[in-house]
Image: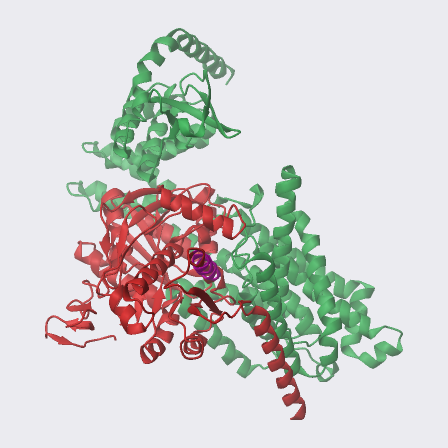
Chain colours: A red, B green
Amino acid sequence: MLKTTRTLAAAAGLAMLAASVFAPAVARAQDTIKVGILHSLSGTMAISETTLKDVMLMLIEEQNKKGGVLGKKLEPVVVDPASNWPLFAEKARELLSKDKVAAVFGCWTSVSRKSVLPVFEELNGILFYPVQYEGEESSRNVFYTGAAPNQQAIPAVDYLLANEKVERWVLAGTDYVYPRTTNKILEAYLKGKGVKAEDIMVNYTPFGHSDWQSIVSDIKKFGSAGKKTAVVSTINGDANVPFYKELGNQGVKAQDIPVVAFSVGEEELAGVDTKPLLGHLAAWNYFQSVDTPENADFIKKWQAFTKNPKRVTNDPMEAHVIGFNMWVKAVEKAGTVASDAVIDSLIGVTVPNLSGGYSAMMPNHHISKPVLIGEVQENGQFEIVSQTPGLVVGDEWSDFLPDSKSLISDWRAPMSCGNFNTATGKCGGKGS
Amino acid sequence: MPRALRLWAAMLLVVAATAATLSGALAADLKPLVRNLGAGGFADTEAAIAALAQTGDPAVVPVLQALEAGDLYVRKEDREVVRGSASNGGYTLTDPLGGAALGEAGRGAVDKIRINNSLRRAISAALGSLTLMSPDAGARRAAADSVFKTRNPDGLAALETALGRENDPAVRSIMEQARAAILLTAAGTPDADRLGAIETIRARGDQESLALLNAVRSAEGASAAVRAAADKAFEAVEMRLSLWGMAQNLWYGLSLGSVLLLAAIGLAVTFGVMGVINMAHGEMVMIGAYATFLVQDAIRTYAPGLFDASILIAIPVAFLVSGAVGVLIERTVIRWLYGRPLETLLATWGLSLVLQQAVRSIFGPTNREVGAPSWMSGSFELGGLVITHGRLWIVIFAFLVFGLLLVALKRTWFGLAIRAVTQNRNMASAMGIRTARMDALTFGLGSGIAGLAGVALSQIDNVSPNLGQSYIIDSFMVVVFGGVGNLWGTLVGALALGTVNKFLEPYAGAVLGKILVLIFIILFIQRRPRGLFALKGRAVEA
């Protein structure tokens, strides 16, 4: 028993040591506005989320050079929820009640967002969530700067229907809430377009799946039935690299069976030889290859900040840029960092995005953004082959799912409801 | 045969002569068509490709190939389409027709002609009809394949001419299949031709043939005889494919099994032989993968010519690096914890987190690219089997490692000493074996072998700090299932789990398949707690 206690004490000591080593070395100035950064810096999601932490640090540093906000410097508070979903909630509580941050930028997976949601609602905090997600949610305390399904999945399927004349569909995804909901929406949408049930194949794989031999060969088999076939991939995280390697090795070419991915960007392709993947597609609201002066400027600053001339940029980074600028503007408009005032003044705020337009925060706490479709090039970048003519407004409650069809969200004063049911005329329905 | 050759040579001469006299005139005709390639959007480019293909002129082929490779540019000053190759900061321009040099241009002076998937398809269809008579057998084969896919009835005449001149039996048979495909899909083919075509397609017998036959038998207005023949052929092909499907599953199972074997075999030494529950085993695999990355990176910078050998060079490096880390861990942590499994488990688990975060701090959280050497990329077909080179080499490598380890343990003095120490430490010590040193070396051996697994896994999985985590559970499963302390058990366990997994996957899906395997193992361990091949005798009790 004594021994166990001693071991435990030693372990605790080690953990504390580790925490103090990894904690950000930020000078604690007296009069600052604190901004929370809630991204995993260790564990499985570190691969994607560490970059977002760096972007936030860069944006805050830049804003401070411009004189900060409301005459005060911004102070980043970085915590590491370690890809551990309950820890996300704990760290969020710590940021809001102990550090008293004015706003939090964070989360990647939907399950981490769901885990912090009650904390933000209880303590009336502000969360900016930068990643494309499945929709079916609208909270007063969360601002969704990533794409809703109608800003990514639906336009991508439309592109394949119109330009590639696809008749058979493989919906492949990792087995968790985002792919399952997105695929449900897509299935309903495709069936509405007259695609028969036998022409849709749905396949789920566990997180980190690495042996894709049978699934890729199934896809090949499904695709050689004489009808044009495409794969819509909601495969997330680490599983993508072995998936694309297997596609390349088994000779699945984009001109025969194109794969359009919703979670594969420039960062994910950094670990793959992209020559065999030429022409496979991705749908996002931003690509590094977007040719605008704003984007060129951003890439230059980012590569200088990371001291790596090859460092790539991606879509969730742009979402944080937009979200951060919106927050700064809203705080200046409200003249305070108090949650209620900022939440109200955020709606209607318009800031330039990196693809040459202006994104606005809508009353449903989602933003308007263009939808881009890109083809993978040999250098790991995307060639933009299609772009929506205008901006698309994020639709939180999908019109293609029966139980969310009649829901809308509007957080402006008289209604102030995240799930208003237009059929019954009452606030309240599924979700929060 | 010599006569055919002579004929061929004569024909080439004639073609060359005409080409020489006509090339000036032809190039002039093609020029405006080529210019259209850079006219504007994707639709314009597609029309221009069709127009170029219509000419049937072989001079078009290099132009289209350059377009496909992304080497064609529009010169901004005169909207001329040129071929460019990158040269220090700019491009060296040549005329796509004929290849005359057109000087240099800066990066801003030219626009790349962009292509998308539908243009790539249009190009390969156009090249298919243009290269049917190419002197290179590989090009003719690719052309015939592309005609088979497009089944364009307009190409029938060209295909039949090419068929008449074809000498290579392999290419000839593909051309015949392409001809049969056109005959089957085109309207108004006489029944006799259709029946012959069905036979040809039946002999091809792959997934595409199945789709084609299915279309024939369900087509409106087909005669009863044709329909019956198509039905019969369809069933025959289906039967053949399902048999090959079984073989394919078996191969996938073997391949997954060999990956499991590689991941588990190091653990079979540290856990199986030494009895150390090493939760940091996966991190040894990861360190091996990062060693591979470093070796390849160094080769890319200092000796690009050796790239194809980089994986081979990485094998000993990864073994030594992971082995050294293993020895270090044994000396600093594990040796204080022998006989205390719970503490070992916690300590090594903590170590695994430390190693992961250390790698993350040094190399960054993002994936590192380890390229595949040319002899490990792509695939080949064996009957109805598709075998990828990378997987084949991993299977071979896994068995080699297994064999070498077996020899090392059974036939060398080192192996004898390891076995002696694990079976009876006091007696071994009395015989003059330095047991502490043997412990360190054994642990190093297990870790080094994990490093070897890292070399192989770098080819099929992410090289990221999390690489090891995804294999640790599977490795323990294999070792426990096979029987702790028995290398043959590990081999059989890995292959059995791999095969069962792959046969379950098509029916149950990847997620449920994994769950079913886990349940099966739990039940199995309930029945036979010591695994498949239990050790008997005094060694077990010790």
B314 or B9: nearer the viewer: B314
Q: Position of residue B516 (x, y in %)?
A: 44, 73
A363 or B230: nearer the viewer: A363
Please identify the quarter of the rendering in which residue B532 is found: bottom right
Q: Going by the picture, which residue comes out furthest to the bottom?
A: A1
Magenta-colored span: A50-62
Please identify the quarter of the rendering in which residue B269 is found: bottom right
Is A146 part of what is drawn in magenta? no
As drawn, B437 above or below B402: below
Is A60 part of what is drawn in magenta? yes
Q: Position of residue B163 (x, y in %)?
A: 37, 25
Work out whether residue B65 can be spotted.
Answer: no
B276 or A323: nearer the viewer: A323
Q: How many marks?
A: 0
Say left or right for B233 vs B174: left
Say left or right for B408 vs B39: right
From the image, give the main secondary structure of the stretch colored magenta: helix
Residue at image point 71% right, 80% down: B337
As drawn, B6 above or below B409: above
- Which quadrant of the rendered structure holds the C terminus of chain B? bottom right
Q: Position of residue B143 (x, y in %)?
A: 39, 30
Q: Position of residue B146 (x, y in %)?
A: 36, 34
Q: Going by the picture, which residue comes out furthest to the left?
A: A424
As drawn, A158 above or below B337: above
Please identify the quarter of the rendering in which residue A276 is found: top left
Residue at image point 31% right, 73% down: A339
